Image: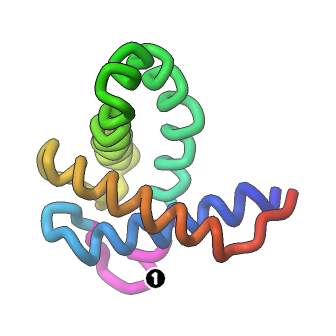
Amino acid sequence: MMNFLVKTIANAGALAVAIWLLHDITLTGDSTGKKTLTLIGVALLFGLVNFLVKPVVQLLTLPLFILTLGLITLVVNALMLLLTSWLAEQFDLSFHVEGFWTAVLGGLIISVVSWALNVVLPERD
């Protein structure tokens, strides 16, 4: 349970950095509290997408992973971010990623920040 909480906080922090750095990734809300709740909801969705969908996509793209020496991971991360954006819209969360290349850059930012936060944050089960 603690590990899930730490990963969700890391995802929320990484998403916040991507939102802050890229103007085509947006999170809107009437107040800071509403934005925070939306960010946590999006982080939960993002974690769910990465847990359920990403392994299947990675398995299907394994030959491309080998062929591109891992660079396909950038595309897979972008697709997971776009899927999260679409799901957020379905759940009426005010989070949106505009365009594939924004998603590629956003996915890269989220990966780096999430990795750094997971190194810093405690990891207990």
Q: Position of residue 8 (x, y in %)?
A: 60, 61
Q: In which quarter of the image is the N terminus?
A: bottom right
Residues shaded magenta: 27-40
* In the image, residue 49 above or below residue 27: above
Q: Where is residue 41 in the image (x, y as percent from the top left)?
A: 50, 59
Q: What residue would you read off at disc 1? A: 33
User: Residue 36 magenta-drawn?
Assistant: yes
19 vs 28, nearest the viewer: 19
Residue 53 seen from this side: yes
**Type of amino acid at the residue the image marks with label 1:** Gly
Q: Which is the main secondary structure of the residues drawn in magenta?
A: helix
Q: Where is residue 3 in the image (x, y as percent from the top left)?
A: 76, 58
Q: Quadrant of the C terminus?
A: bottom right
115 to the left or right of 87: right
Could you tell me which secondary element the residue under label 1 belongs to?
helix
- Residue shown at 32% from the left, 20% from the top: 67
Residue 86 seen from this side: no
- Residue shown at 36% from the left, 48% from the top: 88
* In the image, residue 98 above or below residue 68: below
- Residue shown at 71% from the left, 63% from the top: 5
123 vs 51, nearest the viewer: 123
- Residue shown at 64% from the left, 69% from the top: 119
* In the image, residue 55 above or below residue 38: above
User: Residue 78 magenta-drawn?
Assistant: no
Q: How many discs mark residues in the rendered view? A: 1
67 to the left or right of 115: left
Q: Position of residue 110 (x, y in %)?
A: 40, 60
